[in-house]
Amino acid sequence: MARRNVALALGRALTAMPRPPTLPFRTLAPWLRATFGRPVHRVALDAGSTCPNRDGTRGFGGCTYCDVEGSGTGALRTGSDLKQQLAEGIRRVRRRGDDVGVIAYFQSYSNTYVEEGRLGEVLRIVEPYLGDPIVAVSIATRPDCLPDATLAELADLARRIPVWVELGLESADDSILQAINRLHTLAEFEDAVQRAHAAGLLTIGHAILGLPGDGREGARTTADALARARVSGVKVHHLMVLARTQLAAQWKRGEVEPLEPETYVEWLADFVERLHPDQVLHRLTGDSPPEKLLAPRWDVHKNFVRELLSSELAHRGTSQGSHARVS
Ligand code: SF4
């Protein structure tokens, strides 16, 4: 279906569907406001990390969907060092108001996979801003990159400010994790979450819906695993085919079928129904710079996906946690 037709069809569907008065799932913005008492925005940072799945320690070539920027900003490669990135990010966020808080978000690559001493250096750069305007630090990494020494360093920071560790699970099926070249297992994810919690850290679990071979049942199983692990936050998005990835080559050969928005929303509703009601949804869909994105090109805004999800759950008479297998 042409992009314009998809948007129109969805628009019609949305108007025809019942809308609940409040969202039947927990989103991030109200949670941030309730937790920090002020609006909070993320500043994405590139600390110059790399990834054991690219340098041969765990594997070569990276996850099939990951581009050369390691799912991040690529800022460091453009010459902006971490101090500059942080100062500029804070200036940008502060244009929204003097009281706006900041989450220092170490996004690119595996941020705990660094040479000895580098994590300490990175944390010292955020030190002057802790409390104001930085209200939390969020570190994205792989489940197999959290040795005890790293956890101890993060635990030390967590005594002063909330620290989130964002861990990619993507799929709860080990054979899918192998096929997309993630090269870690569900058990490693569960172990990392458990040890992070024991160290006093908050956790966010990532999931991708629509990975080749994972299917609708995969979306449900992954939600079950995230609910069982009791990660405090969840980020979920549809599979996106980016230029210069292994997935792009598979897609060009016709081996990958990206999800249409209607299908994604149905699977997403299944997924949300299986999460624990307390878990906060940090993200419900993905976006990528248009020049990098090959497929799917939805032309649908992320708020629209949120509205569609809300309507879908209202139509089913369910909400987040309705089908959770944990209490
Ligand atoms: S683990 Fe993360 S940074 Fe490494 S290849 Fe996979 S998606 Fe990219």
Image (cartoon, helix red, strand yellow):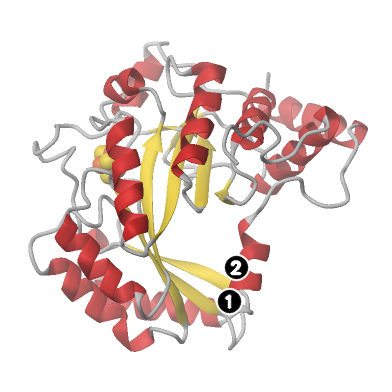
Would you identify the image quadrant in which residue 322 lies?
top right
Residue 209 circle label = none
The residue closer to the viewer here, 238 or 273, is: 273
| Percent coordinates x, y for residue 320 in the rendering | 68, 41
In-image side of 6 versus 43 (left or right): right
- Up/down of 165 relative to 161, above or below: above
The answer to the question of whether label 1 and label 2 lie on touching residues, with beta carbons closer than 8 A, is: yes
Q: Residue at x 77, y 49 (%)?
A: 23
Residue 32 circle label = 2
The residue closer to the viewer here, 293 or 264, is: 264
Q: Residue at x 9, y 39 (%)?
A: 57
| Residue found at the very far front of the displayed protein | 327
In-image side of 278 versus 66 (left or right): right
Residue type at numbered disc 2: Leu
Residue type at numbered disc 1: Phe
* Residue 230 in sight from this viewpoint: yes
Would you identify the image quadrant in which residue 61 lies?
top left
Element under label 1? helix
| Percent coordinates x, y for residue 229 in the rendering | 44, 42
Quadrant of the drawing holding the C terminus: top right
Q: Which residue is mark 1?
A: 36
| Percent coordinates x, y for residue 36 in the rendering | 58, 76
* Residue 85 in sight from this viewpoint: no
- Up/down of 48 relative to 246, above or below: below
